[in-house]
Image (spheres, helix red, strand yellow):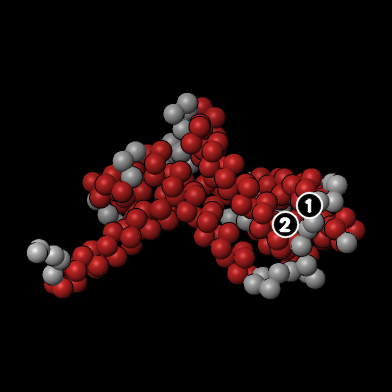
Amino acid sequence: MGGVSTEDRAERVPKQDRSRATRQRLLEAAVACLAEHGWAGSTVSVVAERAGVSRGAAQHHFPTREDLFTAAVEYVAEERSTALRHLFPQGAAGDRHAVVAALVDLYTGPLFRAALHLWVAASNEDQLRPRVTELESRVGRETHRIAVDLLAADEAVPGVRETVQGLLDMARGLGLANLLTDDAARRERVVAQWAGLLEEALG
């Protein structure tokens, strides 16, 4: 019977590792390009050059521009969600100020800027819109779930779900304000106010 030799397996594993590494470089480069140059300035060629791979290699992993950028935003959002959970491995109901600050930070970095450019592009491009709408819905649900867990919020209590969603909507608004000016001082005051409101609302 034929089979895969030890040598073949030894060659295949590094190749798979290289493929994963290339894909990751492309995803990270795509988010960085989108954050810095917007949708119009972020082509597959620009991303491939930044990632240090050929355009052909980029299109092997992501056949279309839409594939690349939606996958990139989703990948980095998942990485940020994982990092957020790791900040509070035991939960953080006793330090809601820290949770609010961490959630707000999600909306003040390159990922939010990249996602915003993707949303604006999707509002004008029919081919992109359904993919970004579905992605935003999925990322939004996950962020809400993380917020509920970290805040130890009981959504069976009337109004709690809306309170958590209001927190995330507020965080997004602070992220928008931060795009134009350094809003750190006002942001800190708003974070402190929301932490106090959550203590009252969630108990």
Badge 1: few (under 14), some or many (20 or more) residues near its Cα, within 10 Å? Answer: some
Q: Point out the image quarter for the C terminus.
A: bottom right
Quadrant of residue 149 within the rendered picture: bottom right
Whether residue 63 is visible, yes or no, is yes
Do the numbered discs 2 and 1 sit on residues whose CB atoms are within 8 Å? yes
Quadrant of residue 109 within the rendered picture: bottom right
Q: Is residue 148 above or below residue 83?
A: above
Q: Distance between the residues labelled 2 and 1?
A: 8 Å
- Please state if 169 lies on the left or on the right of 64 as rendered: right
| Helix, strand or loop under label 1 | loop
Return the mark for residue 155: 1
Residue 178: x %, y % from top left: 66, 50
> Looking at this rendering, what residue extends furthest in the front direction?
1
Q: What residue do we see at 33% from left, 60% from top?
A: 20
Residue 90: x %, y % from top left: 68, 73
Q: What residue do we see at 31% from left, 51% from top?
A: 49
Return the mark for residue 148: 2
Q: What residue do we see at 84% from left, 46% from top?
A: 159
Could you tell me the amino acid type at mark 2? Val
Q: Point out the image quarter for the N terminus.
A: bottom left
| Helix, strand or loop under label 2 | helix
> Looking at this rendering, what residue extends furthest in the left direction?
1
How many labels were placed on the picture? 2
Q: Is residue 155 above or below residue 86?
A: above
- Please state if 126 lies on the left or on the right of 12 as rendered: right
Could you tell me the amino acid type at mark 1? Glu
Whether residue 97 is visible, yes or no, is no
- Please state if 93 lies on the left or on the right of 48 as rendered: right
